[in-house]
Image: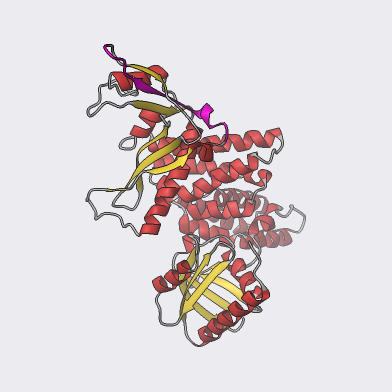
Amino acid sequence: MAKKSKSELAVEAKEVASIIAAARKARHNFALFHGKDDLIFKAHKSKNKSACRKMAKDEGAGAKGAVGALEVEEKFVNLIVEDPDSTPANFAKTFRAYLSARGLKMKVRLLSEDGDVIDDGAEGDEEAADAPPELGDDIEQVLEKIAKHFEAMKTSLLRCLNSAPADYRERVVKAVELYKKAMKAKSPDTALKALAALRKLVAATPSPVIITDRLSSAGDDPEALGKLDGLVNTCAAQVTSDPAFMDRAFPEMRDMRKALKTAMNKKPPPSNIAELKAMKEALDTMFYDHVDKPPRAHGPECHGPGLTTQQQEDRILKKKNPRTGKKFKGKPVHKASNFLDEAAFVESQMVLRTQALDHIDDNGIKPPPKGAKPVRLPPMKAKLVDVLGPNWQTSVQGVKRKKQKGQKDTCVDATWGPDSNCKAIYDLLDDGTLRLVTLYPNPIA
């Protein structure tokens, strides 16, 4: 983040101090979001949360943050957040640093609307729980140390219970009960095993907020990212049982895939590379399978990997669907192209779907009424070289119709060039999700 000048901080310090002083007397509504260079904080006594959010957005607020009610008592700033599950990881600590940079030495707590502490600004509990106590002769001392480790992970545990799918939450609750039963029975070895199992469950919770938490903790460290394999596995299991999870967690799973790619480019040890590659391939399969089914099948069936040049020629000359071999209705096509691997298809989907989401947000497009016809978005485009890198031509193939006077039409290789792009069309559905209509690599001729 770019550092702000002393004069800029001084202006903000005066404004923030005024808000804190006023909030000591009366509850305010607030909006606190990550911006391009720093946090953006807006609060007002009479304006509602939506108005505070708009004020923050007008100053460049991003998507990650929180809205809610602000209360100040003594040295505590209490943020009573509206949606705890979507609050960024370590947000209390981040806001505490923001206040400190403006001369306000305050403690920050994030609370649920029921008054539960969901983040007290303490250091992350990953490190605190990494080295559980060793079993010794003094059982009471060991049990006390184990209890401290359980307390250290309470914030993450609460976030897990708030955001996990119901069936997964049941597993976590059972693990907590086993831990408490072992502690009551004063059985430290069983308690340690239960605590270790609970930590794994919490760390691998398939939820958008947990994905963000784990990515925030791992940063760009290839070894730390390699430990997210359990999270990838549970996300895959969740997508299988609940396909809609992919829509809910798309931005976070996209960020995880991007982090894995970045880590692989840092050239870690071969064993770590293999681990990261396997995780990325698992995510690629999840993303690809998510669109490779009706009514989302056109992109993969006509432009996905595994198609031969002959199938593409039959699509042009015989109007045959490459996947089914059946003749399709409508006008004949004059170009046919496809991606050669899932990764290239998914990479293009990542970029173009993000474009579509930005288009919806920038233009204030609302989902249609329930049961109404989807809203067709304009085509999203991006140059293949920008999406797939300098070797993009190894990931696409295509043919085009060639007319011959007095003879049947034939096909020749499509012409690719630096301006060749990938193109996607999306529908916005009544539940607010996007449906991929088609996605394909687009040769220039």
Q: Give the answer, above or below, for where 343 lies relative to 194.
A: above
Left or right: residue 370 compared with residue 356: left
Q: Note whether 427 is above or below 156 in the view shown.
A: above
User: Going by the picture, which residue comes out furthest to the top?
Assistant: 407
Q: Is residue 392 a member of the stretch shown in magenta?
A: yes
Q: Residue furthest right?
A: 137
Q: Is residue 391 magenta?
A: yes
Task: Please identify the quarter of the rendering in which residue 352 is found.
Answer: top left
Residue at image x 68%, y 56%? 127
Relative depth, front residue between 44 and 406: 406
Q: Quadrant of the N terminus?
A: bottom right
Q: Nearer the viewer, residue 180 or 295?
A: 295
Query: Which stretch appears magenta?
Result: 390-406
> To which quarter of the image does residue 276 belong?
top right
- Image point (64%, 66%), residue name: 122
Pick the quarter of the image with the C terminus.
top left
Q: Percent x, y for residue 221?
A: 67, 47
- Give the x, y percent position of residue 289: 42, 35
Depicted 389 relative to depicted 77: above or below = above
Please state the horizontal and vertical placement of residue 24, each as a whole percent of the image: 53, 85
